[in-house]
Image (tube, rainbow, N blue to C red):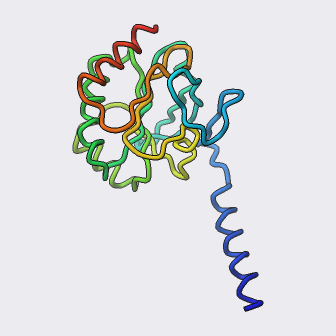
């Protein structure tokens, strides 16, 4: 028993250290005063983040400053996401260039995310959130959760759960009205 406890503690420490290493291609910054694990809500300034997309391209939401944009957390195994993602993709297609959008995968194997993107023809950038740092900073605990972010970096609307066509369109209208 005396040997088992130190071995368990060593295993936990080694596992923790593996997850604490920073990947230079994945980073997140939070707005001053934003408490980590805070549920980002309407009116809050969103954290900016950098990730690599499924195609290997960088995405950096700090580049969206001064423009409205959309961040959607989703997963291929999520039934409501299968309904919402094509709606978001259609909205993106209608506003391409005018409204940046990024999908962030949540607890989803990369191979399954790629399969989903291909099957549904998703055109906007999709980035894996390995380690769930981005989801945690936004306070996301289930998917789909979509943030409509104004040009000022504040959430205009947060839609948790499957967004209906009329709800998503209304949120997009409010969002684009802020710019």
Would you place residue 174 above or below residue 44 in this image? above
Q: Is residue 171 left or right of residue 60?
A: left
Q: In the current view of this chain or complex, which residue is farthest to the bottom?
A: 1
Question: Residue 138 appears at what percent x and percent y?
Answer: 54, 37
Q: Residue at x 71, y 29 (%)?
A: 33
Q: Residue at 77% across / 90% down in the picture?
A: 2
Q: Is residue 171 above or below residue 161?
A: above
Tell me: residue 105, above or below residue 47. below
**Position in image of residue 25 (x %, y %):** 59, 42
Residue 76 in the figure: left or right of residue 155: left
Quarter in which the N terminus is drawn: bottom right
Which residue is more in the foreground, 2 or 49? 2
On screen, residue 172 versus residue 128, left or right, reads left
- Residue 137 position by quadrant: top right
Residue at 33%, 54% in the rendered image: 112
Q: Nearer the viewer, residue 143 or 124?
A: 143
Against 178, residue 30 (above or below) is: below
Residue 14 at what x, y percent from top left?
69, 69
């Amino acid at each position: 028993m005396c040997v088992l406890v130190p071995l368990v503690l060593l295993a936990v420490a080694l596992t923790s250290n593996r997850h604490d290493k920073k990947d230079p291609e994945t980073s997140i910054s939070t707005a001053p005063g934003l408490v980590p694990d805070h549920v980002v809500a309407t009116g809050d300034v969103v954290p900016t983040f950098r990730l690599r997309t499924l195609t290997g391209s960088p995405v950096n939401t700090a580049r969206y400053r001064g423009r409205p944009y959309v961040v959607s957390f989703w997963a291929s195994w999520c039934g409501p996401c299968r309904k919402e993602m094509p709606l978001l993709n259609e909205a993106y297609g209608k506003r391409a260039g005018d409204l940046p959008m990024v999908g962030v995968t949540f607890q989803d194997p990369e191979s399954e995310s790629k399969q989903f993107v291909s099957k549904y023809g998703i055109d906007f950038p999709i980035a894996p959130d390995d380690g769930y740092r981005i989801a945690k900073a936004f306070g996301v605990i289930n998917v789909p959760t979509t943030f409509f972010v104004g040009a000022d970096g504040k959430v205009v609307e947060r839609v948790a759960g499957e967004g209906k066509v009329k709800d998503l369109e209304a949120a997009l209208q409010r969002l684009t009205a802020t710019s």
